[in-house]
Amino acid sequence: MGLEKIISYLSGYVEILIRGPQPEKLINLITGSGLYLWHVRRVAPGIVHAKIRVHGYLRIRELIKRSGCHVKIHRKHGWPFLRRKLAERRMFLVGALLFVGLTMYLSTLVLFVRIEGFEGRHRDKLLEALQRAGLRPGMTRQELLNQKRRIEREMMLVTPEAVWLGISVKGVVAEVKAVPRKTPAAAAGPSDLVAATDGIVTKVVTIRGVPAVREGDTVARGDLLISGIRWHQDSETGAMVAEEIPAGGIVEARVWYDIEVIEPKIVWKPRLYNRQWTCYRLRWNDRWIPLFCFGKKPASHYFWERYVKRIYPGRNLGEGVELIKDIYRDVSWHQVRRSPEDVKRAALAETALKKKQLKNLIIERQMEAWTDEGLFVKLVTTLETTQDIAMAVPRRKEF
C-alpha cells in the first residue's frame, strides 16, 4: 500500500466527481479497462467521489461518453502539479533553497558560548580570555574541535582561579565548564605556605607574602614556598620594616604518586567435594527456628555458603522473616601455580582499585614497572599529576 501511494504521488493523481443517473456504469467501465481507481465512495444521490492517476484520467474520455455521465476534477495532487506551481513561483523556490542552505550552514557554526562554574567578574574575565584565544561566536564547529586542546591549555595558564576547565560542543552551543578553585581563608595569625608533598614547581601565584620558589624548582615536603612576611618603608625613618602576615597564594607542582602491588605466583585454592550438609532455618527478628537438615556435617575443613530469601521485610532494619539456607561442603586445600596472564590481570585490578582511592586527582601520565621477585611479581605504578601543594603552617619565630 505504501508503494502504491508513492507511485501515485510521483505520477500525479486527481480527485474526480462522477455525476449521472448511473455512475456505477462508468466505474465498471474504468475498472474493466485495467485502470486503477481507489477511494470510491458515494457522497450524494447520483454523485460518486473517486481518485485516479493522471494518465488514467486522460484515457477515460471515451468511457465517459459511453456511460452518459459527467466527470469533473475536484482536486489535483502529486509531484507534476507541485512542480508546475514551483515553476510559476520561482522566487519562492529560490527563497526556500536559500533558507535550507542557510540553516545547514548555521548548523555548522558555534553561535553561543555558555560558561558554567564562574559567575560575575570571573566569568567576564574568562569570556574575554576565550575570545583572545579564538573561541567566539561565528567560528565553525570543526575549527573549534581542532583547537579544543590548545584553548583548554591556554585557559588553564591564564586562569589560576580554575582547577579544571573543559570545552564541549552541543549543537550550536560551545559549553565551557570550569571548576573554580577554593581559596582557603586567611589564617588567624602569621603563617607560611610550605610544600605538602615533593614535586617540581610549575606555577607560582602570590596573593600575600614573598615567594621563596619559582617555576622549575624542585621542592621536598616541608620546604618553604611563600613566606608570610611583607616589607614596607617606614615613613619617618625611611628604613625597611618587616611585617608578619598570613601568607596566601597558589603553588602548583608536578607530583608523582606510587602504587605498589605484590601478587604471588602460587596460591592456595580449595577443592570442593560432593559431600555436603544442608540446613534450613527460619529467622524471625532475633529468633532462629531450625526447620530441617540433611547430609553429614564436615568435621574440620569445610566450605560454607549461605543463601537468604526474605519473606516479610518488617518495618525496621533487622526485623522481618527470612528463610536461610546454609551449605557446608568438605574441602581440601592445594597449591596452584597461576599463569603469568592471571598474575598480571590480578595486579592491574588491584592497582585500579587503589587508584579509585585517589579522589579528585587528574592523572596526566601513568608509568608501570614490573619486577619478578621469585615467588612474587611486583608492580609499581607511577601516576603523574599537577596539583596545588601549598599548605599553610604557623610562622616560626625567628630569634
Image: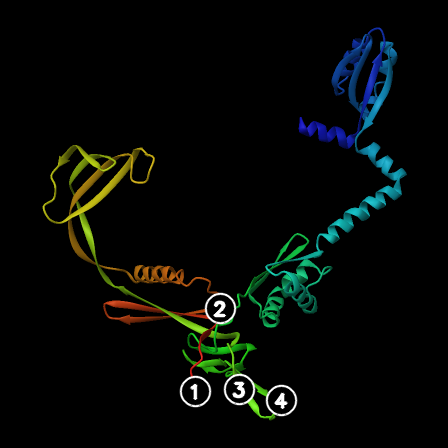
Q: Which residue is mark 1?
A: 398
Q: Which residue is mark 2?
A: 364
Labels 4 and 2: the sequence-earlier one: 4
Distance from the alpha carbon under mark 1 to that under mark 3: 12 Å
The C terminus lies in quadrant: bottom left
Query: Disc 4 marks which residue?
Result: 235
Numbered label attached to residue 242: 3
Q: CA distance from mark 1 to mark 4?
A: 25 Å
SS at circle 3 = strand
Which element type, helix, strand or loop, lies under badge 1? loop
User: What is the three-letter code of the residue carrying label 3?
Assistant: Ala
Which one is closest to the eye, mark 3 or mark 2? 3
Instruction: Give residue 36's mark.
Output: none
Labels 1 and 4: the sequence-earlier one? 4
Instruction: Give whichever of discs 4 and 3 has the lower sequence position.
Output: 4
Q: Earlier in the sequence, mark 1 or mark 3?
A: 3
Q: Which of the pair 202/122 is nearer the observer?
A: 122
Q: Give the residue at x 78% y 21%.
A: 51
Q: Secondary structure at mark 4?
A: loop
Q: Amino acid at mark 1?
A: Glu
